[in-house]
Image: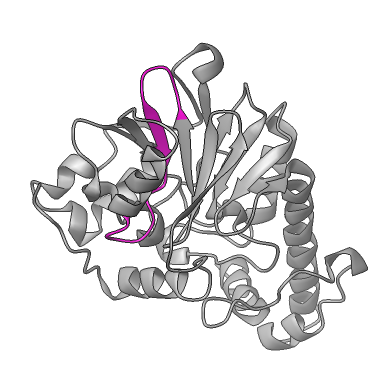
Amino acid sequence: MKRIVILGTVVALGIVATMSRPIAQGNVAEIEQVKDNLYVITGGGGNTGAFVTDGGVVVVDTKNPEWGAAILDKIKTVTDKKVTMIINTHTHGDHVGSNIDFELPIEFVAHANTKTNMERMPAFQSPSGRQYLPSRTYTDKLSLLGGDDRIDLYYFGQAHTSGDTIVVFPALGVAHTGDMFAWKGVPYIDVNNGGSGVSYPKTLLAAADGIPGVDTVIPGHSPVMTWADFREFGEFNRDFLTAVERGKAEGKTAAQAAANLNLPAKYANYAMSRGTLTSAEDNATKIYAELDQ
């Protein structure tokens, strides 16, 4: 298989670098059983889901470049079945970077907007690279496989990017949220790939209300959490947006609004900064820019 190095544009490089440094869960891949035949593989970028079905293994997100072998090694500890499908929750290099490490044929699945975003990445522009782009896309909802192996893909609107997919395993009551819900704290809003600080809370809360039967969540970069945590994250973003809008209406700068959020005490454990990746001030600035459009 020909190797492809993800070089990226300046924007893409910035996303890959910042997404991998402060939030990657170590340099060693580890596998943990979430429920029954569903596993999470940590390390090397975003959390990878591995769902062992009757027909093969479905992988959700493939981490940074050159982590495919580590993912496959961990999958081999729980099954000898081949990877037959890869679902990409969104476009970032720490979630799609090792697509090219997997042996074809594989069905690649993502939201239509994510495919468009991925097509701008140099790694997927060569004839060989295009083989690892999504071959199947959807707009609002898509169901894959069937019976206890069924997987439901949901899209509720702009948030982290313009194409964030929530991957639901209904027989297990588990959702993989990608970086729409990566951690408890201010999210990274990638405006260069269609992210929106104004739409973010509406999208999250629409998902919380619109997806039935989920109790467990695999976030993009955190240990397994609950659906109640996901809903609370939506409420946090709603209250953050309200506070920033209030600050703007009072004539404050984005920095002043971010410094005087006065959020409810229940968010005391939420991080207001993710190192060089994002901060309350960064997100307030992006929201101000959106509101001025």
Measured along the vertical axis of the image, is residue 192 above or below residue 208? below
Q: What secondary structure do most residues of the magenta stretch adopt?
A: loop
Q: Looking at the image, what colour scheme do you see? A: one colour
Measured along the vertical axis of the image, is residue 59 above or below residue 17? above
Along the viewing direction, whichever of 58 and 52 lies nearer the viewer: 52
Q: In the image, is 80 to the left or to the right of 124?
A: right
Along the viewing direction, whichever of 205 and 128 lies nearer the viewer: 128
Along the viewing direction, whichever of 159 and 242 lies nearer the viewer: 159
Q: Would you identify the image quadrant in which residue 132 lies?
A: top left
In the image, residue 169 lies in the stretch drawn in magenta: no
Q: In the image, is 228 to the left or to the right of 106?
A: right
Residue pictured at 31% horizontal, 47% vertical: 116
Residue pictured at 15% horizontal, 49% vertical: 129
Residue 169 percent coordinates (x, y)? 57, 28
Along the viewing direction, whichever of 45 and 205 lies nearer the viewer: 45
**What's drawn in magenta, residue-wise?**
52-67
Residue 90 percent coordinates (x, y)? 43, 50
Residue 10 percent coordinates (x, y)? 29, 76
Q: In this view, which residue lies farthest toward the front?
A: 77
Q: Quadrant of the C terminus?
A: bottom right
User: Quick check: can you spot residue 154?
Assistant: no
Q: Would you identify the image quadrant in which residue 283 lies?
A: bottom right
Residue 39 percent coordinates (x, y)? 53, 39
Residue pictured at 42% horizontal, 17% vertical: 54
